[in-house]
Image (spheres, grey):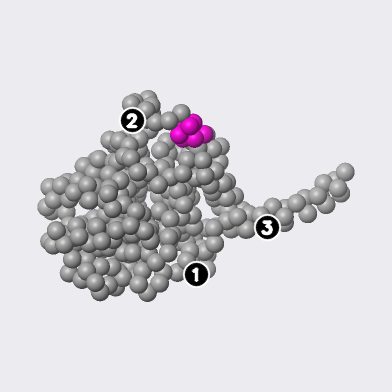
């Protein structure tokens, strides 16, 4: 009996490993020369070289906005951002809008906004091929100049002024140069903001949370809120290690933080749903569930490791 079990495992395990390799995302695509440049009010046509997160910070805050076909929703979100950011004159900042190969006028809208606010450092990067939301956030973060880096959705669903709540809590939990403050809508589960959503959407949300807890990555109640604040060093380590660029890239970031011992604090924020979501409920729910399983499996068997860990072992 033991012989047959051993034989079955000898055949099955390589097969399962092959399936894991086949289904897992490939290595991150290298950026094209144009994607390593940005346009701005001072240079709307000719791109300037993007900086690297490896360089010292030169502003207090970088706001990274991933955008895909956001012509209609981008300007109101940026208006709200500037309305708040300009009330803290002692805090220098930049805004990095990463256009994920939109098919509408997202880049033009962003550049037009920059032109209307010439004293604000607004940088627009455009991908030549779609990399998904996680890829856009990763690119913006790794080419930012801020001591702290805020990722925020282009739809304006999160109240931008709640940045101060995240900022304060990050001050409290920051472990030297490391820390992440995660905006959370978990307190809104029984409120009108969530109850009014469709039964299917709420069912998928609860099912996803159950899956996260089952896979051991559910230590944060709301992993998917697009309002997260990172210290520069944490952003460097986490985004350099990122493999998944789809909807659950947030989950990988939080899992990496857990593995590396980076302190994470969950902060309740104000949020309201905005029409125009790019998510296809059934298709993306299936892909998200698949990616969570792949994520957990790859880190469990050691195929994926944090970049910093891999570097230390090679030194």
Q: Is residue 298 left or right of residue 124?
A: right
**How packed is label 1: few (under 14 Cα within 10 Å), some, or many (20 or more)?**
few
Q: Is residue 283 left or right of residue 154?
A: right
Q: Which mark is residue 18?
A: 3
Tell me the distance, in whole angstroms, between the alpha carbons under discs 1 and 3: 30 Å
Tell me the distance, in whole angstroms, between the alpha carbons under discs 1 and 2: 50 Å
Q: Quadrant of residue 266?
A: top left
The region drawn magenta spans: 200-207
Instruction: Look at 15% across and 47% down and name the residue there.
Output: 83
Q: Quadrant of residue 286?
A: top right
Looking at marks 1 and 2 on the same chain, the residue that comes earlier in the sequence is marked by: 2
Q: What residue is shown with label 1?
A: 315
- Asked if the residue under mark 2 is in contact with the one under mark 1, i.e. CB atoms within 8 Å, the reply is no
The residue mark sitting in front, 1 or 3, is 3
Q: Residue furthest front?
A: 104
Residue 312 visible, this angle: no
Q: Which mark is residue 193?
A: 2
Q: Is residue 126 left or right of residue 115?
A: right
Q: Main secondary structure of the magenta part?
A: helix
The residue mark sitting in front, 1 or 2, is 2
Q: Is residue 314 left or right of residue 197?
A: right
Secondary structure, mark 1, is loop
Tell me the distance, in whole angstroms, between the alpha carbons under discs 3 and 2: 43 Å
């Amino acid at each position: 009996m033991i012989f047959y079990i051993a034989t079955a495992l000898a055949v099955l395990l390589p097969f399962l490993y092959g399936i894991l390799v086949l289904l897992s995302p490939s290595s991150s695509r290298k950026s094209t020369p144009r994607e390593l440049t940005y346009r701005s009010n001072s240079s709307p046509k000719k791109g300037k070289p993007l900086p690297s997160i490896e360089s010292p910070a030169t502003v207090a805050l970088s706001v990274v906005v991933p955008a895909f076909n956001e012509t209609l929703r981008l300007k109101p979100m940026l208006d709200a951002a500037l309305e708040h950011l300009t009330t803290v004159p002692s805090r220098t900042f930049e805004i990095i809008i990463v256009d994920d190969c939109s098919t509408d006028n997202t880049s033009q809208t962003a550049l037009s906004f920059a032109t209307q606010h010439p004293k604000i450092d607004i940088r627009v990067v455009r991908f030549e091929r779609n990399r998904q939301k996680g890829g856009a956030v990763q690119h913006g973060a790794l080419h930012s100049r801020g001591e702290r880096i805020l990722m925020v959705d282009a739809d304006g669903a999160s109240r931008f002024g709640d940045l101060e709540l995240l900022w304060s809590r990050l001050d409290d939990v920051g472990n030297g140069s490391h820390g992440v403050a995660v905006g959370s809508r978990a307190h809104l589960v029984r409120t009108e903001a969530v109850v009014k959503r469709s039964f299917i959407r709420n069912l998928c949300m609860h099912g996803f949370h159950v899956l996260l807890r089952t896979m051991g990555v559910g230590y944060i109640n709301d992993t998917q809120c697009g309002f997260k604040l990172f210290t520069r060093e944490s952003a460097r380590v986490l985004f350099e290690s990122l493999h998944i660029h789809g909807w659950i890239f947030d989950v990988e970031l939080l899992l990496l933080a857990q593995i590396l011992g980076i302190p994470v604090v969950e902060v309740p924020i104000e949020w309201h749903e905005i029409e125009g979501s790019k998510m296809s409920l059934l298709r993306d729910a299936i892909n998200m569930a698949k990616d969570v399983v792949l994520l957990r499996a790859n880190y469990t068997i050691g195929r994926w490791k944090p970049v910093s860990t891999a570097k230390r072992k090679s030194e």
